[in-house]
Every structure is written in C-alpha cells, then in structure tokens.
Image (cartoon, grey):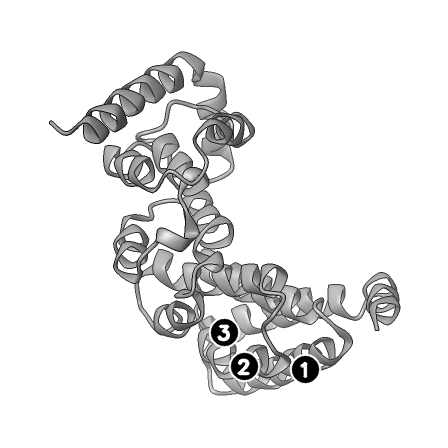
Amino acid sequence: MDAWKRKTTETLDGIVAQLEAKGSDANRAGMARYGINVDRAFGVSVYELRRMAAEHRRDHDLALALWARGLHETRLLAVFVDDAKAVTRAQMEQWALDFDSWDLCDQATTSLFDQTPHAWPAVADWAVREEEWVKRGAFAMLAGLAVHDKRASNQQFEATRDLLLAASPDPRNFVKKAVNWAIRNIGKRNLHLNGVMVELCNDLLQLADRSAAQGNKSAASPQRWIARDALRELTSEKAQARLAGKG
C-alpha cells in the first residue's frame, strides 16, 4: 500500500473510533425526531463534527474515504473536510445518489457543492430529476448559491424562475421546502431579486387556484404553501428594511 493510502486509512480508522466514542443513543433519538435517518449513525452532533473537521481541512483523499465508509457522520465529515476545488462533477453525481437524509443533502449542497464550478449546471440538471433527494439537492444548492456566490448576476437567479415554477407542484415535503428555501434566499439577496421572487410567489398563487379549479389539489397545496410562506418573509418590514439598507 502506498504511504499516502496507508496514512488516509489510518486517519479514517482513527476518526471512526472517535465517532463511535462520541456517539450516544440520546443524540440518535434526537436526530430521529427531526427526521434524520439514523440507521447508520452514531449520534454525534454536527457541531462536534465541524470541530473534528477543522483538523483535516481540504483533504480531498480523506473526504473520498470518509464518504465511502458509508456512515452518517463520516459522510457529513467528508463534506466538511473536502476541497471544493478538487470536487468533480462525477463525484457530485455519485454523492447525490447516496443522499438518504435531508441534513446530509443540505450540508453537501450548501457547505461544499455550491462552492464548486459545477454548481450552476448541477442545479439545472437536478431540478428536473425525479429522485427526491437529488431534486431537493438542486434547490438547496440554489439557496446556498444565493448566499455564497457573490459574483453571480441577477440574471442568473432570474433564469431559475422556470425551474422553481416547474417544481412547485411537487407534493413531497422535502422538495417543496427546498423550493421555498431557494425562493426566500434569492429574494433576500437584493431589492431587485426580492421583487422578482415576490412576483413569482403571486404567480404561484394563481397557479394554485388554477390547479385547484382543475381538481388537482395535490399540486395546489404545495404551490400555496411555498408562495404564502415565502411572501410572509420577503414582504415583511424587517426584510424590506434590510434590503433598503443594502441598496
């Protein structure tokens, strides 16, 4: 075995031992109450995982090994220690297919993938996929880009309007919440995009009325929830005052 492979393996084994020691049934139960898949989890908090990750920053080889280990906490650690510059599009696709819990999906897409050069193409590709976690990943990543991609133009975010509208009838809870999250984050980016997203929400309410009139309540319900929840935040005095201050 090459020296670097041996070192990675030894580091991985040591990390797994630490995770096992730090885990607890109480934490696992708490995670489960929040809808996190704990089938392969030790019960280590994300705060402790981030502390552990600080010792292994930007170690791409270790990240790949941690992900391959297949445990909930090793995969979260993989997200926190990986080097965004080394992440490939193929890696993003493989990891997305491995998502099995909302927290893993959200951490991967908003703490790593959204910082790669592949983020925008992945959003466009994943937003029309049927797999629940992949589709959620598209809109979670878009929510992350709205916060982290300082160089993105208003036009780039406006261009996601059709993706947001197309996904709005999806009744799956984790998908509709991610669509809502993306709309809210884009709408909080600046005053112009706030107006764009408020208009989109009003269009969603009209679409919901149309869906309901056609007897499609399964589409109308998520559309209404997405729009009303987002409008509540985006049109609030607090949000408007903060955006006016930025402008």
- Tell me which amino acid carries mark 1: Val
Q: Element type at marker 2? A: helix
Query: The N terminus is located in which quarter?
Result: top left
Q: Is residue 70 above or below residue 109?
A: above
Q: Residue at x 43, y 59 (%)?
A: 116
Residue at the spot of label 1: 196
Residue named by callout 3:
168
What residue sits 38% from the left and 68% below the top?
122
- The answer to which quarter of the image holds residue 227 is bottom right
- SS category of the residue bearing label 3: loop
- Residue at the far front: name it: 3
What residue is shown with label 2? Answer: 161
| Residue 181 numbered tag | none
Q: Is residue 125 left or right of residue 242?
A: left
Mark 3 crowdedness (10 Å alpha carbons): few <14, some 14-19, many ≥20:
many
Residue 172 makes an appearance in the image? no
Is label 1 in a helix, a strand or a loop? Answer: helix
| Residue nearer the viewer, 96 or 66 | 66
Name the amino acid, label 3: Ser
Foreground mark, 3 or 1? 1
- Horizontal and vertical percent position of residue 106: 47, 50
Crowd band around label 2 with a 10 angstrom C-alpha radius: few (<14), some (14–19), many (20+): some
N-terminal of the pair, mark 2 or mark 1, is 2
Q: Is residue 43 left or right of residue 98?
A: right
- Is there CB contact under 8 Å for labels 3 and 1? no
From mark 2 to mark 1, how far is it between C-alphas? 9 Å
